[in-house]
Structures are given as C-alpha cells and as structure tokens.
Image (spheres, rainbow, N blue to C red):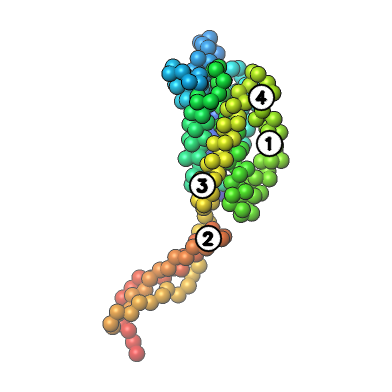
Amino acid sequence: MHTDLLKFRSSIIYTMTFVGILWLVRIVESLLSFDLGVLGIHPRSLAGTVGILTGPLVHGDFQHLMSNSLPLIFLGIGVFYFYNRIALEVFLGIYFFTSIWVWIVARDAYHIGASGIVYGLASFLLFSGFFRKDSRSIAISLIVIFIYGGMAYGLFPLNEGISWESHLLGSLAGLLAAFLYRRHQLATKVEYIEAEPYEIHRGDKVTFYDHTWHDANSHINYIYKGNTTDSKDQD
C-alpha cells in the first residue's frame, strides 16, 4: 500500500479513536444520568488532580462535544498525517501540559472539555510553519489561520461560562511543542536511484557497498543500490 495512504489511514485511526472515546464517555453519561463534571480539572485541589487525566474527556452536553469534535478531527488528522513521526508525542504533551497548567493557574471551578487540546493542535500547526520555515509547513500554517483564525477570541475572558484558561494554556502548549520539535524532520520520501556502487580495495579484493545520502533540504533519501560482492582485482 502506498506510503501516503498508510499515513492517512493511520492519522484517521488515531484521531477517530480519541474522538470516539469522547463520544462514548458522553453517551454513557447520558444513558446512566451521571454528572461527570466532578471529573473535570479542579485547580489546586488534591481531589481535582484526577481531572488532569479525565477533564478533557468530559463534556457538558452533546452540543459542547460536537463543537469540539469537528475541529479535533480536522486538526488531529492534520497533525498525525503531516507530522506523523512526532504526532503522538505532540498530542500527549499538549493533553497533559494543558491539563497540568490549568490545574495550577485556572479559576476555582471545574474545567471540562477537549477545547484546550483543539487550541493546542491548532497552535502547533500554526507555529510549526513559522519555526520550520519550509514551504509545506508554512502552507499548513496559512490554512489553519484561514479556517481557525476566529478561535483567537476564545483566548480572552469574554464569556464567564467558557474555560478561556484552557484555550490559552492549550495554545501555549502547542507553541512549546512546535518550538521543541522544530528540528524534527517531516515525513520523508524515499527514492531509489540506480547507480554504480562505490569500491573499497583491500589487497586483491574489491568489496562493493551500497551508499545512502540524505538531502536535508528536500527531505528525500537517495539510496544508491549495488551488490555487495568480492571479486578479483584485474589489471
């Protein structure tokens, strides 16, 4: 199967698995008439530390969940497809750093929902282009600005019922991830170029070796293929 198709399928699986967990939690909560809001992040309380793990999984209602699901799908697939080598580390870093920071500095209330992750993924895609300065990353950044530029309003305390702290801190987590992983290569293409193998002479023996060369600018591996053999050196 083509490499790009495998990457795309993998990005869908990772993203939809997480979104599926969010929906499962909300459906179970609705069917059993539970209020899982107490599993949110309650800042600076010992009991509230459980929310660092569970808070992003809980949503107030189906409308709240839907508003997070659509951008999670788009941004999650984008991160796992274009940055597949580091995507899982980036996602987990955004998840936990956002939650921990909310627990440390946010208002005294229960903070629930995956919106902090949404802002973190958008921020990572946005700032990765600025830090990497390659054409593909910059193009992704511009797309994020065009589609999700309006999210900037969520960074400010304009609505008392919305955890703007999660939005702001998630954005900072995404910015930090983009900076820390700025030197990690994007997914590479591999091209096989037939060429003569190079030789190393040892007495009357000639050993042929394959040679691999990586172009850091284009992110392409050029692999010069040859047979590894021993033969008599002829005058």
Looking at the picture, which amino acid does disc 2 mark?
Ala
Regarding mark 4 in the picture, which secondary structure is present there? Answer: loop
Classify 10 Å Cα crowding around label 4: few (below 14), some (14-19), many (20 and above): few
- Disc 2: which residue: 216
> Disc 3 or 1, which lies upstream in sequence?
1
Residue tagged by mark 3?
181
Label 2 to label 1: alpha-carbon separation: 31 Å
Please give the residue where the numbered disc 4 appears in the rendered image. Answer: 157
Q: Sequence-wise, which precedes: disc 4 or disc 2? A: 4
Q: Amino acid at mark 3?
A: Tyr
Q: Quadrant of residue 126?
A: top right
The correct choice, above or below, for 189 with respect to 65 in the image is: below
Residue 25 against residue 213 in the figure, above or below: above
**Disc 4 marks which amino acid?**
Pro
Q: Secondary structure at mark 2?
A: loop
Q: Which mark is residue 148?
A: 1
Q: SS for tag 1?
A: helix
Label 1 or label 4, whichever lies nearer to me, is 4
Give the CA distance from mark 2 to mark 3.
Answer: 16 Å
Earlier residue among tags 2 and 1:
1
